[in-house]
């Protein structure tokens, strides 16, 4: 059983074999009243159970806003759900009531995990296999562009939560454009609106969708200011991604509502990652060690898949081994859609937990 938790509504559902098996149930969240809010969550999952035709769910798994102690299922002080201030043991409560494992995680983490198990990583690895190449990718950096700048990390095909449930918090990295601020001040809906207003001189705030239409020539407005709004955001995001790439070394997948403007965002991100950074002797070096390819572009996908493998001799031996000389990283927009990726990430996390628990039981 799963839940899409928002400040206005909670949407409950159930998945089996990776597919939704009931019609989603939407209930008002009552975000300012803890007692009513918790009873709504219980009621929502009870309604899901009633729609399962007598089948018993194996687990509850869903995304919930942070800050939180996700490993222990405790939700902290939330902006959109103020009733949870002070720390609420949501996971343990649900486990006590429904008698099944309950897993709660950050939506950015689950987005990355969903793309790792069913979206971006399978697409990359299947494409490589079809091209006759032996290399595979097991790591992934997922970012979401929307109200804020969300992130998640997958390492060796496993979600990386961190020791304090605080991994993937890319929004907290330093802002390349405004160094005294966090990067989210330049990578968010409000940032696009701010830059467009500053450069166009328009006083009335308009939505990022409208700004995209202006940039795309579909709506009247200051086209260059609209393009600049997305490109400035892309540069700020790119510098944070450069730091993440230096540590994680994995493909990048982009989700969130603003990802729809990828035609203005991805080229600028790649240009920044393909640029230089300098040492004190003014010697330039690549900003990203690996060459970055936009795999949503057919020609760049072909270049990414081009064979760079060849055999080298093992010294003092007759054997040869495969050598992949060029380091390559793929970047692209979500293959699943953000909501679907989050949902499948939650589902996959539950399956992984149940499998490990069963293996542990068998071993003892």
Image (tube, rainbow, N blue to C red):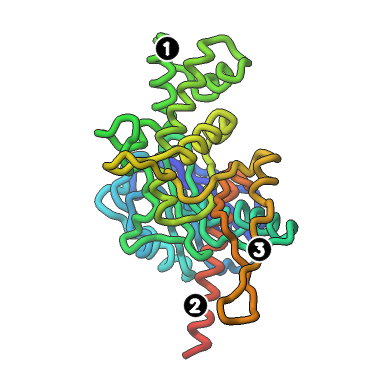
CA gap, disc 1 and disc 2: 55 Å
View extreme (front): residue: 316
| 87 over 281 or under it: above or below | below
Residue bearing mark 3: 310
Give coordinates of residue 74: x percent, y percent.
Answer: 33, 58
Give me the disc on residue 204.
1
Give coordinates of residue 273: x percent, y percent.
Answer: 47, 41
**Quadrant of the rendered image containing residue 216:** top right
- Label whose residue precedes the other's in the sequence (1 or 2): 1
| CB contact under 8 Å: marks 1 and 2 | no
CA gap, disc 1 and disc 3: 58 Å
Q: Residue at x 63, y 44 (%)?
A: 295
Give coordinates of residue 59: x percent, y percent.
Answer: 52, 66
Which of label 2 and label 3 is nearer to you?
3
- Label whose residue precedes the other's in the sequence (1 or 3): 1
Does the rendering let one see residue 171? yes
Q: Residues within 10 Å of mark 3 (few under 14, many from 20)?
A: few
- Left or right for 198, reference 343: left
| 321 over 78 or under it: above or below | below
Give me the disc on residue 357.
2
Task: Look at the image and tell me in which quarter the N terminus lies.
Answer: bottom right
CA gap, disc 2 and disc 3: 42 Å
* Secondary element at tag 2: helix
* Secondary element at tag 1: loop
**Quadrant of the rendered image containing residue 321:** bottom right
Give the tally of numbered discs.
3
View extreme (bottom): residue: 364
């Amino acid at each position: 059983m799963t839940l899409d938790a928002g400040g206005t509504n909670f949407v409950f559902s159930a998945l089996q074999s990776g597919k939704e098996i009931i019609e989603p149930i939407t209930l008002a969240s009552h975000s300012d009243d803890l007692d009513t809010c918790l009873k709504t969550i219980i009621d929502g999952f009870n309604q899901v159970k009633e729609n399962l035709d007598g089948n018993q769910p194996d687990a509850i798994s869903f995304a919930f806003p942070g800050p939180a102690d996700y490993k222990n299922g405790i939700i902290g002080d939330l902006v959109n759900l103020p009733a949870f201030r002070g720390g609420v043991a949501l996971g343990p409560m649900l486990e006590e009531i429904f008698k099944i494992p309950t897993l709660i995680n950050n939506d950015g983490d689950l987005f990355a995990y969903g793309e790792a198990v069913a979206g971006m990583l399978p697409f990359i690895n299947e494409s490589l296999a079809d091209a006759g190449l032996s290399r595979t990718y097991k790591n992934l950096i997922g970012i979401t562009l929307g109200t804020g700048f969300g992130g998640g990390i997958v390492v060796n095909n496993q979600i990386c939560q961190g020791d304090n449930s605080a991994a993937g918090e890319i929004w907290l990295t330093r802002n390349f454009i405004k160094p005294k601020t966090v990067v989210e001040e330049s990578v968010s809906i409000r940032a696009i609106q701010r830059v467009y207003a500053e450069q166009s001189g328009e006083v009335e705030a308009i939505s990022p969708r409208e700004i995209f239409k202006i940039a795309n020539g579909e709506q009247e407005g200051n086209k260059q200011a609209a393009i600049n709004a997305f490109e400035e955001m892309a540069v700020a995001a790119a510098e944070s991604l450069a730091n993440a790439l230096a540590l994680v070394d994995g493909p990048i997948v982009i989700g969130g509502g603003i990802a729809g403007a990828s035609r203005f965002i991805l080229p600028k991100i790649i240009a920044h990652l393909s640029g230089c950074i300098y040492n004190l002797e003014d010697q330039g070096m690549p900003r990203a060690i690996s060459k970055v390819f936009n795999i949503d572009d057919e020609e760049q996908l072909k270049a990414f898949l081009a064979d760079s493998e060849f055999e080298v001799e093992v010294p003092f031996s007759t054997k040869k081994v495969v050598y992949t000389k060029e380091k390559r990283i793929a970047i692209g927009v979500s293959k699943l859609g953000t909501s679907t990726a989050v949902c499948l990430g939650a589902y996959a996390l539950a399956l992984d937990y149940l499998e490990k628990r069963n293996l542990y039981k068998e071993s003892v």
